[in-house]
Image: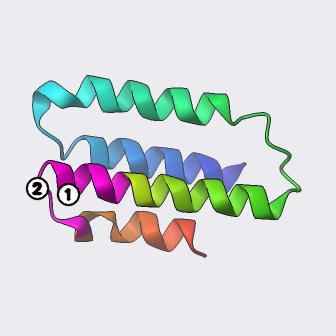
Amino acid sequence: MEKALRIYGEVLRLVRRLPKDTRPYYAKYARENFVNYREVDANDAKSLEELFHRAYNHSVWVLNKYSVDGSAADKLKEICYN
């Protein structure tokens, strides 16, 4: 649970790097996704790992879409892949 909260917090920090008019949409999108998966069994390491990797990959995709340097997601990558 702690790792998921750290990832969520980092995703929200990355949202702040997006253009101002897009931030509410992506903040809401992130929240909805984390809420939708809150029922995943905390002991199911494979499912959690998959969700964390998806969070990272999608974050990088959105950053690239708005021409934000993908290296901004380095901290998220570290959290997701460790």
Q: Amino acid at mark 1?
A: Asn
Q: Whole-percent x and y of residue 22?
A: 19, 29
Residue 71, compared with residue 2, is above or below; it is: below
Q: Quadrant of residue 40?
A: top right
Q: Whole-percent x and y of residue 51?
A: 62, 53
Tell me which residue sits at (23%, 30%) in the image.
23
66 part of magenta stretch: yes
Is 50 on the left or on the right of 27, as rendered?
Answer: right
Q: Quadrant of residue 29?
A: top left
Residue that mark 1 sits on:
64
Instruction: Give SS at disc 2.
Output: loop
Which one is in front, 40 or 79?
A: 40
Q: Amino acid at mark 2?
A: Ser
Residue 12, compared with residue 46, is above or below; it is: above
47 part of magenta stretch: no
Asked if labels 1 and 2 touch by Cβ distance under 8 angstroms, the answer is yes
Indicate the quadrant containing the C terminus: top left, top right, bottom left or bottom right. bottom right
- Per the rendered image, the range of residues in magenta is 59-70
Query: What kind of secondary structure does the magenta stretch mostly adopt?
Result: helix
Tell me which residue sits at (78%, 64%) in the image.
46
Instruction: Give SS at disc 1.
Output: helix
Tell me which residue sits at (14%, 48%) in the image.
66
